[in-house]
């Protein structure tokens, strides 16, 4: 019997998508024939060799409405003719071509909701765009049988809103405790933010606080819509010597940077339900690196911190609140060491080795179209 074939579709360029590397890697290791389909930009770095196949589609338009239209059309025609048994859409922005192609070809359509797409800041500030995405979600999602998302809160919301169950497969890292050697000033501690430099991530607020923070530097690992604005803001605040822009960092390098941090930052403004109910991968990355972090007191982080106590939670991003939290972890050695110590047992539970089991159980329930017998499940190696 040949391996079951699965195509996953994303809108990014694949190289920086740690979640998809884990998912596709685990399924490939379990005996599935996996293809990850993404978007190729002129600045996209070469793809790393992986145990699964990867393909990137080039577009004439690379942002805005025309990009989504063109990319969805290209994905649709690609899926019409590629050899596959199952098609998995990652987030709402690739769901329509996946759903239509699966219907035409009588394949299984799977929905992996990485986020609450209709509640991201870029969508909720544009009412017309929001209505289009919401209409698409209402049209397609209730027709699907196999769905999963990244956190319990989103699972509840999606179940109530669309009437179909969503499994929870969290975006947690592979457990790799690596002792990186590095050099830094002994009196200089590193505050690390990893992720996109976009609106609503609390980065500008962090910069406002940095002139008053002694003995620490801020590392920003990522790029985004606010990249130029944030660099100019550093100049305005005269903190160029206290902020390091690392740019877009590949996953291997990001682990090295995270291991050097003293404090991890995951600070979101309450701009829409996507942020409020988020469960970001960086929260787990900090735990895996034994790095105490500062997070918002949003539901998912409150629930996990009650269990593991690995971070400080703050109610808002007011300057005084943020400054107090940073200084607490910089100067309260007892508290810091306690949180750091708590990261170790938490990392043994909140890791991909545990979450992978849920992923494989989910995919085992799918119809086995490789031999046209819907009652059989793939052999998991």
Image (cartoon, rainbow, N blue to C red):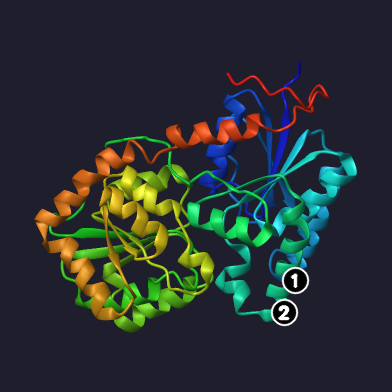
Q: Residue at x 64, y 62 (%)?
A: 161
Residue 181 in sight in this render:
no
Q: How many marks?
A: 2
Q: Marks 2 and 1: CB-CB under 8 Å?
A: yes
Residue at disc 1, secondary structure: helix
The percent coordinates of residue 21 (x first, y second) are 55, 40
Residue 206 in sight in this render:
yes
The percent coordinates of residue 239 (x first, y second) are 28, 75
Quadrant hosting residue 202: bottom left
Label 2 – label 1 distance at C-alpha: 7 Å
| Front residue (pair 41, 191) | 191
Q: Residue at x 52, y 72 (%)?
A: 272
Q: Which residue is mark 2?
A: 128
Q: In the visual, does 177 lie left or right of 9?
A: left
The percent coordinates of residue 309 (x first, y second) are 25, 52
Q: Which residue is mark 1?
A: 132
Q: Which quadrant of the figure contains the N terminus? A: top right
Instruction: Point out the residue furthest to the right here.
Output: 104
Q: In the visual, does 249 lie left or right of 31?
A: left
Q: In the visual, does 106 lie left or right of 37?
A: right
Image height of 360 relative to 293, above or below: above
| Front residue (pair 314, 218) | 314
Q: Residue at x 54, y 71 (%)?
A: 225
The percent coordinates of residue 328 (x first, y second) are 16, 65
Residue at disc 2, secondary structure: helix
Q: Residue at x 70, y 33 (%)?
A: 366
Instruction: Point out the residue furthest to the top here.
Output: 1
Please rate how many residues cluster around mark 2, counting C-alpha atoms within 10 Å: few if below 14, some from 14 to 19, many from 20: few
Q: Which quadrant of the figure contains the C terminus? A: top right
Please rate how many residues cluster around mark 1, counting C-alpha atoms within 10 Å: few if below 14, some from 14 to 19, many from 20: few
């Amino acid at each position: 019997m040949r391996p079951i074939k699965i195509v996953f579709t994303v809108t990014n360029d694949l190289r920086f998508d740690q979640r998809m590397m884990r998912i596709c890697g685990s399924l490939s290791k379990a005996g599935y024939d996996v293809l990850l389909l993404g978007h190729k930009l002129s600045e996209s770095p070469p793809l790393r060799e992986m145990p699964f196949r990867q393909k990137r589609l080039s577009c004439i338009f690379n942002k805005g409405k025309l990009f989504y239209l063109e990319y969805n059309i290209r994905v649709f025609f690609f899926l019409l003719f590629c050899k596959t048994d199952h098609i998995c859409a990652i987030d709402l922005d690739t769901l329509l071509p996946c759903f239509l192609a699966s219907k035409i070809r009588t394949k299984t359509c799977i929905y992996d909701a990485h986020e609450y797409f209709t509640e991201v800041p870029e969508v909720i500030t544009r009412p017309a765009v929001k209505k289009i995405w919401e209409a698409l979600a209402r049209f397609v999602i209730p027709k699907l049988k196999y769905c999963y998302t990244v956190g319990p809160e989103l699972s509840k919301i999606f179940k109530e809103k669309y009437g179909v169950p969503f499994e929870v497969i969290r975006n947690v890292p592979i457990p790799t405790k690596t002792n990186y050697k590095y050099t830094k000033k002994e009196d200089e501690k590193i505050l690390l933010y990893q992720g996109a430099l976009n609106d609503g991530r609390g980065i500008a607020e962090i910069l406002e606080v940095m002139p008053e923070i002694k003995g620490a530097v801020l590392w920003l690992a990522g790029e985004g819509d606010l990249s130029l604005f944030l660099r100019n803001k550093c100049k305005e605040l005269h903190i160029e010597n206290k902020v390091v822009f690392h740019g877009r960092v590949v996953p291997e390098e990001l682990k090295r940077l995270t291991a050097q941090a003293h404090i991890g930052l995951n600070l979101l403004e309450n701009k829409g339900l996507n942020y409020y109910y988020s469960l970001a991968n960086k929260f787990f990355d900090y735990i895996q690196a034994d790095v105490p972090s500062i997070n918002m007191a949003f539901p998912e982080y409150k629930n996990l911190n009650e269990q593991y106590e690995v971070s400080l939670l703050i109610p808002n991003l007011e300057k005084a609140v943020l400054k107090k939290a940073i200084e607490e972890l910089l100067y309260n050695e007892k508290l810091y060491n306690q949180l750091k110590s708590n990261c170790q047992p938490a990392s043994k539970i909140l890791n991909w080795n545990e979450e992978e089991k849920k992923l494989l159980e989910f995919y085992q329930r799918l119809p086995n179209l490789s031999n046209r017998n819907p009652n059989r499940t793939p052999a998991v190696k």
